[in-house]
Image (spheres, rainbow, N blue to C red):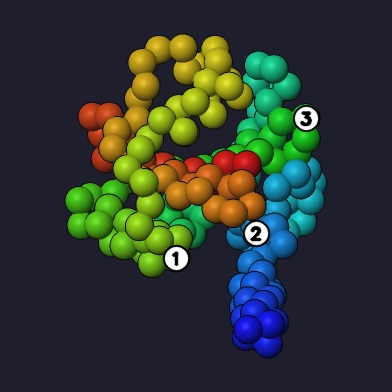
């Protein structure tokens, strides 16, 4: 019996080690960009691109926007949102028809799993970062949410009454 337990423990340790080896140490958003980076670091990773100026919002929050960034088969405006501790959120803003929403939902589910039907996380994060802008009603509709092991939250939502959609990566 002791041999069997020792063998099972060894197998479980090997499985645990193999599973842990497959998990990334930290989430990499795109082009190797990770949470906590500063604007200058991201500019270096993104290279030559058309950027809006770094905009200062209430509470020390800064936003830097890259126009026409690629996401899957689409182009989107990509906003990098910074707080005191560096990069905290990345938002793809894009216009999609119903077929494109289905395609992108499928692509996200293939990469991250089924997801949870929710849109509240993005609204709560936006209220925390820029409360002056998000005091009114929640503008987001429907959506899926994924919670990754490193604490990253991914949210895919529509904007109420339009074809605008957001894919948000939040730390």
Classify 121 as above or below 131.
below
Q: What residue is disc 2 on?
A: 28
Name the quadrant containing residue 25: bottom right
Classify 60 as above or below 95.
above
Image depth: mark 1 or mark 3 in front: 1
State whether residue 27 appears in this view.
yes
Give the CA distance from mark 2 to mark 1.
14 Å
Residue 58 in the image: x percent, y percent? 65, 16
Of the numbered discs 1 and 3, the one sitting upstream in the chain is 3
Q: In the image, 171: left or right of 121?
A: right
Q: Which mark is residue 111?
A: 1
Q: In the image, 155: left or right of 169?
A: left
Of the numbered discs 3 and 2, the one sitting upstream in the chain is 2
Classify 57 as above or below 141.
above
Q: Which mark is residue 84?
A: 3
Say few, some or many: other residues with alpha carbon within 10 Å of mark 1 (under 14 / 14 to 19 / 20 or more).
few
Give whichever of 43, 81 is nearer the camera: 81
Classify 107 as above or below 101.
below
Residue 44 in the image: x percent, y percent? 77, 56
Q: In the rendered structure, are the residues bearing label 2 and label 1 in contact, judged by CB atoms less than 8 Å apart?
A: no
Residue 66 in the image: x percent, y percent? 58, 47
Give whichever of 144, 8 is nearer the camera: 8
Q: Residue at x 27, y 29 (%)?
A: 160
């Amino acid at each position: 019996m002791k041999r069997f337990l020792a063998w099972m423990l060894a197998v479980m340790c090997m499985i645990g080690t193999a599973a842990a080896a497959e998990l990334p140490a930290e989430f990499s958003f795109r082009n190797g960009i990770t949470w906590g980076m500063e604007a200058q670091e991201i500019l270096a990773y993104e290279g030559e691109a058309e950027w809006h100026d770094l905009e200062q919002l209430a509470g020390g929050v800064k936003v830097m926007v890259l126009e026409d960034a690629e996401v899957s088969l689409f182009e989107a405006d990509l906003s990098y949102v910074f707080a005191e501790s560096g990069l905290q959120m990345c938002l793809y803003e894009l216009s999609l028809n119903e077929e494109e929403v289905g395609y992108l939902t499928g692509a996200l589910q293939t990469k991250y799993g089924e997801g949870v039907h929710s849109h509240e996380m993005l609204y709560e994060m936006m209220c925390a970062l820029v409360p002056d802008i998000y005091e009114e009603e929640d503008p987001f509709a429907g959506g899926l949410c994924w919670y990754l092991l490193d604490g990253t939250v991914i949210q895919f939502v529509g904007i109420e009454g339009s074809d605008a959609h957001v894919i948000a990566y939040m730390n």
